Image (cartoon, coloured by chain):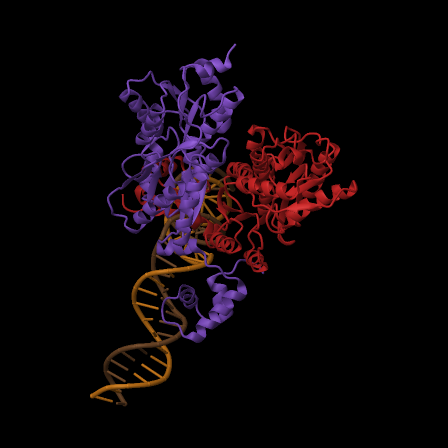
Chain colours: A purple, B red, C orange, D brown
Amino acid sequence: MAGKPTLRSVAQEAGVSIPTVSQVMRGTGRISEQTREKVLEAARKLHYVPDSRAAAMRSGENREIGFVINQFANPFNAEVVSGAVDLLDGEGYLVSILDTRDDAARQSRQLEAFIRNGRGGLMWVPALDTPEETVALLRAQGIPTVTFLRPAGDDFDHVGVRNAVATDAATRHLVDLGHRHIAYLGGTGMTAVRRRRIAGYERALAAQDLGPAIVWPSIDTKRAGMEAMLELYRTHPKVTAVVCNGDMVALGACLGLVKAGLQPGKDVSVIGFDDIEDASVATPPLTTMAVSPQKLGRKLAQVLLNRIREPEMPVSLSEVFAELVIRETTGPAPQSSDAAASTRAR
Amino acid sequence: MAGKPTLRSVAQEAGVSIPTVSQVMRGTGRISEQTREKVLEAARKLHYVPDSRAAAMRSGENREIGFVINQFANPFNAEVVSGAVDLLDGEGYLVSILDTRDDAARQSRQLEAFIRNGRGGLMWVPALDTPEETVALLRAQGIPTVTFLRPAGDDFDHVGVRNAVATDAATRHLVDLGHRHIAYLGGTGMTAVRRRRIAGYERALAAQDLGPAIVWPSIDTKRAGMEAMLELYRTHPKVTAVVCNGDMVALGACLGLVKAGLQPGKDVSVIGFDDIEDASVATPPLTTMAVSPQKLGRKLAQVLLNRIREPEMPVSLSEVFAELVIRETTGPAPQSSDAAASTRAR
DNA sequence: GACAGGTGATATATCGTTACATCATGGTAC
DNA sequence: GTACCATGATGTAACGATATATCACCTGTC
């Protein structure tokens, strides 16, 4: 009853030495069937569970890995996480997740907490404005680390999305539908990711001699997307299509259009990014640049496993393509470029 | 460069003994200002981070705690988690989260993983059909444990919601609006929680001599809620109001109604449970039984802290009340009890 | 000048486990 | 009967930290 069961207590119960119990538990060494039985019986009786941390200390093998992500509740991220966790779980790793909320100070504390508590590997979405100091800290520990979505220096493996190619394709799709005034909506802070997405959008506009580019900021939530859309529409009534930084923003934008008495996909076209589950269920269903979060998560986990198993391999960089999924929030541009505006005003 | 920094390497760098460094790092013992500086300088230089697991082994204090939950991505749960994490983070604890997906086998592996990897405390939403064996395993470890939402035996502290009172109130609200045919929608498996919620619903019906009770199962997702609503409506056209087991199901139900050409809150009233963020943003905004997930999460964390600090305290049971938030998905019952049906058929 | 007391550092044992070396035993070979 | 080998177990040190005891050294006191 008192105290948790250890190798020692099991050994005592079974009447053998500690190393013997250790070997039985791990199936190594030469053990007679008879003592094996005896030991297993004792272990069962005491509900013995080995202490991996003590084991890790001696053997150096640590099967606990950490995932530091910028937004825990975001459905896209949640699916990435579950993809990564599934793969690693199958390989006998325990994955624990922390949410930085894109706060660099919080992130610093959390990474340190992971280091203190011994992680055998890290998957990391660096927060906005991650200081070089944090990167240096991580480097000094020599823990196998893979950055995700946002790169952080050349010392870590990286898994990301072909952002510029994707927004280029998204914008081109809208141009092909006849839209001439296309805005970019969402994303906060000038992250590398956002820069690349905007670059793709601008490249597509430039290729068709359209412009000027209209880049409208917004937090990555549905509510913020709604408010941003209303505001954008008020100030730029000529806009008939928006490329969004993420599905949450896009769904919010649709909500905003409905609130303004407009119909997404008819009066104003909206295109998202990620293809989260809600995108296909929403009314109307959202056109979006789909990246399979499950696949991305598995890729991420696989890269980390490779690093753990082959620490000396050269740093790798993997980028996954996004794919245009056409649903009902994009459609031909209205006849007059401000037909949408006329529906509304006065 | 090679290998992670340890007390030993810092001691060597600073030219002092290992215990000295240990004392400096923790601010204990008597240390001259001069050596203190020297040691801190060396620690900074090597990016030294103490290994809490080794420390825990010797001192017995473990500030890493685990949260085992049944559905990670569920927005309500996500907010509970963030509430709990915030409080514990402030107290210097590291919280790691695992998702059982209500799979008992998966849960058993995960709990064991937490035990192996040494958690100083556990918050636990027991999966459906959790076997007694799992409970016994946990008990044998003597780890401070708090169950959440679903109780699991009398040996653990528990934090939950006044379920029966809440669904009673929800049903009564619908009765007051004139509804006479009210169904209960959602929830899978006969959990204690679901039983209690259904009991509240049935109690309210019985108090008004209404009936029979119609209990319709559904997974706790939006899509499943939508499908269940369509099916329910097809087979029970007289129903003019549904009490839902959760907001996700309720939002799905509204989607289903719209798909069937009906208007939530007018043709059929829908009431949810939880008050997740989407509930207030949805169109129309959802009437629901609100429990503040943040508050619940903090409560949960507080109970666990108390247990960790006072291991001998008698087992506690905390239940939080839910509060009716009236929005737009509930309204007066249509004139004819099957007015809704007539809108639809033939 | 010997002793008490405070200061600032170190020696040593220990936590639960694993790696490696060692040891007792019995069977086989010569 | 000695040597050799395989088998099945144990002894010991180490991982990185902390707790406790101990130890120099200095100061002040009688």
Q: In the rendered image, which quarter contains the N terminus of chain A?
A: bottom right
Q: Quadrant of residue B209?
A: top right
Q: Nearer the viewer, residue A332 or B173?
A: A332
How many numbered badges does the structure rendering display?
0
Q: Quarter-wise, where is residue B329 in the image?
A: top right
Residue farthest top in this picture:
A346
Residues C12 and B88: in front is B88
Q: In front here: A173 or A160?
A: A173
The answer to whether residue A15 is seen in the rendering is no
Q: Residue at x 45, y 75 (%)?
A: A34
Q: Percent x, y for residue B140?
A: 56, 58
Please tell me whether residue A234 is drawn above or below residue A300 in the rendered image. Answer: above
In this rendering, would B110 be left or right of C27?
A: right
Q: Position of residue A87 (x, y in %)?
A: 39, 50
Answer left or right for B327 relative to B113: right
Residue B191 appears in the figure: yes
Q: Position of residue B268 (x, y in %)?
A: 65, 34
The x and y percentages for residue B333 are 71, 32
- Residue farthest along the front direction in this orientation: B346
For the point 53% across and 64% down, the residue is A46
